[in-house]
Image (cartoon, rainbow, N blue to C red):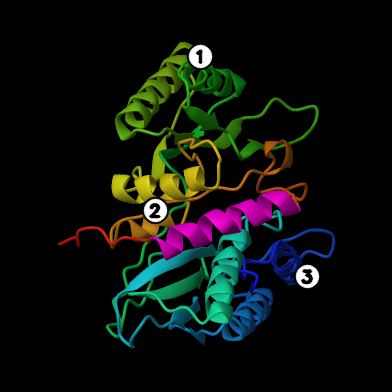
Amino acid sequence: MTQKIEPSALRIREHCEAPARCSTQTSGLTRIFLSDKQRAANELVLQWMKEAGMSARLDAIGNAVGRYEGERPGLSCLLLGSHLDTVRDAGKYDGMLGVVSAIECVHALNRRGKRLPFAIEVIGFADEGRRALQLDAARQSRRGRHVRSGAARTRRRSRSVLAIEKRCASEPELVGTVGSLETFPGATNVIPGKVVFTIDIRAPKDEQRLAAVADVKAAIESISAKRKVETSITQVHEGKTAACAPWLMEQIGEAIAAEGLPVRKLPSGAGHDGMALVGLTDIGMLFVRCERGISHNPAETISLEDAEIGARVFLRFIENFRPGKKRD
């Protein structure tokens, strides 16, 4: 009996490791949009797409796009993938695992000689969250950028930071981060005359996030008034919640359960390519656990077993995919 061809966990790991050398950092991983290092990563991904049996190209914005035709050319496609750029001092698997696993699933289908009643397109996005995508033959480009969710910039000292921490710790799944803080003049023995810091507030529901933003603004203004300090708050970006489609979540859950695994649902606090795509099409997400839960970090790693399980679930979902109702 011929052994059924399955995705290779070893190849997935090798293909995630290779682009880690495409970095502007010598002692870590940083790969930013439109950089020479991203171009090098794109070339690797395009090569793997071709080896997997796909046609492969770079689109106008620099996304790596591979297409595996269905039972006949020109069918509608199931779109898979993630991003190829990284945060600064990143991990090897964030984004890259989604692209590599999708390519590996197509590789397995191609080696089986199997075509589906729809095409598959795998996209390695050049800039996570940037809404620039070519769909089918039409060049439809919508641009925007998710930088922060409910972000604000203000002048104030540590009491305001503690107020942010207290408010955002008061509710499950509400997160508030002061990621950048600058003091002026910045001397060790001088009380700062000005403090500038950023606030990033995220929640699984927009109403929860908006309520927290309003409360944080009020707290900062109250603290500043009591201490007779001038405060300026500027909102630089707002990204709305991007909800996964229930019909896609159901099919992903079926694939997970069929592998004998428990089906768990969780909100993701990170920004994803889905935030850009949700305005164009329905989205769903499949997550693979990281060791000790560490992500977006040089210590980020996954086991071969988890890489294999994730790819098997992904392939099962693809093979059993049932298109949902088309959006207007």
Separation of marks 1 and 3 at Cα, in angstroms? 50 Å
Q: Determine if residue 129 is in view.
A: no
Residue annotated with mark 1? 227
Q: Quadrant of residue 178?
A: top right
Answer with mark 1 or mark 2, whichever residue precedes in sequence: 1
Figure label count = 3
Image position, residue 301 (x, y; %): 74, 49
- To which residue does mark 3 refer? 21
Residue at x 61%, y 67% (from the top left corner): 100
Q: Secondary structure at mark 3?
A: helix
Tag nearer the camera, 1 or 2: 2
First reached walking from the N terminus: tag 1 or tag 3: 3
Relative image position of residue 135 (x, y in whole percent): 32, 76
Which numbered circle lies on residue 275?
2
Q: Secondary structure at mark 1?
A: loop
Left or right of residue 110, residue 119 in this image: left
